[in-house]
Amino acid sequence: MSTELPAIEGYVPFAGQRTWYRVTGTGEEPGKHPLLCLHGGPGATWHHMEPYQALAARGRRVICYDQLGCGNSAVAAEHDPAMWTTELYLAEVAAVREHLGLDRCHVIGHSWGGMLGMAYAAARPPGLVSLIVESSPASVPFWLTELARLRAGLPPEVEEVLRRHEAAGTTGSEEYQATMLAFYDRHVCRVRPYPEWLQRTFDELAANPEVYFTMNGPSEFHVIGPLKDFDILGEIGRIEAPTLLFCGEFDEVTPATVRQAHEAIPGSQLVVLDGCSHMAQAERPDAALGLVDGWLAGVEACLARRAGSGRGGRAL
């Protein structure tokens, strides 16, 4: 699937600021719906969702955007970092949909984006055709217990360096930053060099880490910001949209973590991709994109059958 497709970019007025977006593709073929992509972090950029733009070749628009405070949506004016909340980003999803006229669409979220997607879907927004969640916890407190297990599997000398700097509050040191790559190489992305789009994500995050440091903390495995209390297990049972969840075999958001969300969302499907960690679209791009493409086609075929038979179904 080629990514050499027509695209337009622009801004959505939001929260007194501007949210940058990119729309790949020119419209939908009959029976198809656009795909709205929610990037991770929180505080990363849209670049790690770039591979999903290829799905526009299947006759649908693919919409990516930088969440407020990130990348092209950075806030230059003086502001209070306390503004970065889940509630703000939920409102932003709705604002993007309204501005772009996405009355009916699929939503895919990766990592934090999937957490945001589940919280959004739990509110039963109208026109949500389906939800795709890639490598996302519904309960960060549970996920932290899984992260502790993964960290216990690191070489003792690596874990000693990490814990020493975490205890001292020196996680910005070169030693900590270099040592944490031992975890990233196992559980975040298992291919080197990183694809250009993933390197752009990490570079942009390093250049503007405020949202990430405020909400999450200094690293993927040391979550000490407000996100440490994120837990919507009691809410996601309300999700009515068809839902696909997937993750990697070696994912930092472990299969057990994603399975917990799967078991809480009625009728959802779960897929674990062998050989992958947190960046399946980098490690096995054909498998990841093929899985998402097949899911979208299957949901839309089901809708077409229902429409043809004149039967109703759950509200979409």
Image (tube, helix red, strand yellow):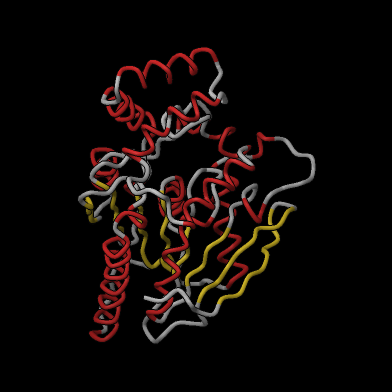
Task: From the top left corner, tell me how far across and down residue 233 is, in percent.
Answer: 34, 39
Task: From the top left corner, tell me how far across and down residue 100 is, in percent.
Answer: 59, 71
**Quarter that holds the C terminus:** bottom left
Front one among 136 and 121: 136
Which image quarter: residue 306? bottom left
Residue occupying image coordinates x 70% and y 57%: 18
Front one among 164 and 57: 164
Front one among 27 and 313: 27
Task: From the top left corner, tell me how far across and down residue 129 is, in percent.
Answer: 38, 68
Residue occupying image coordinates x 35% and y 39%: 185
Residue occupying image coordinates x 52% and y 71%: 102
The outermost residue toward the front is 193
Q: Is residue 232 left or right of residue 38?
A: left
Q: Is residue 119 left or right of residue 248?
A: right
**Quarter that holds the N terminus:** bottom left
Front one among 256 and 1: 1
Q: Is residue 169 left or right of residue 132?
A: right
Which image quarter: residue 285? bottom left
Task: From the top left corner, tell me how far across and down residue 11 is, in percent.
Answer: 68, 64
Which image quarter: residue 8? bottom right
Q: How many marks?
A: 0
Is 183 situated above or below 188? above
